[in-house]
Image: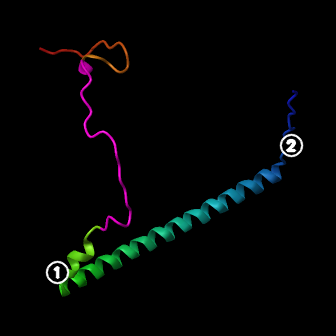
Amino acid sequence: MAHRKRAVPEISEEEQEKRALLQKEWSKYRFDQHVKETRLIEDFLKSQEKALKELRSESEELYQQAIKVDNSLFPYEAIGPTYTPPIKDFEKTSLDGEYIDLTRQYK
């Protein structure tokens, strides 16, 4: 079976410049979007901290309930070995093969 090769079209200097400007615009747009999202998250966290502080001043019991971790939100169960026996003579072997210690000893 013969493989066809697609000819790579020549891109004019004008088109290269156009693509470079488009790439710069896209990078600036994505950076601005990232900054806005980061600021929004920071604002949410500040609001949450303020609300928790207010709640704590009203009721310590409600505050403790509010900060308690709810494991049902992200259920995770792992089954596997809980103990791995040591490998015999592991300390004496090098994982990288031969090893010659060239560390200078000053006495």
Q: Earlier in the sequence, mark 1 or mark 2?
A: 2
| Figure quadrant of the C terminus | top left
User: In the drawing, what numbered circle is on residue 101?
Assistant: none
Amino acid type shown at disc 2: Pro
Q: Is residue 80 magenta?
A: yes
Amino acid type shown at disc 1: Glu
User: Dot 1, how many residues are within 10 Å of its Cα: few (below 14), some (14-19), or many (20+)?
Assistant: few
Q: Is residue 58 above or below residue 4?
A: below
In the displayed structure, does residue 28 sit left or right of residue 43?
right
Q: Mark 1 points at which residue?
A: 60
In the displayed structure, does residue 31 sit left or right of residue 3?
left
Residue at 22% in and 15% down: 104
- The quarter of the displayed image where residue 103 is located: top left
Q: Is residue 16 above or below residue 89?
A: below
Single out the residue that lies furthest toward the bottom. Answer: 58
Q: Residue 22's x, y, as percent?
A: 71, 59
- The quarter of the displayed image where residue 56 is located: bottom left
In the displayed structure, does residue 28 sit left or right of residue 50?
right
Report the magenta residues as a range: 70-91
Q: Is mark 1 on a helix, strand or loop?
A: helix
Q: What element carries label 2?
A: loop
Residue at 82% in and 53% down: 14
Q: Name the residue under label 2.
A: 9
Q: Nearer the viewer, residue 60 or 35?
A: 60
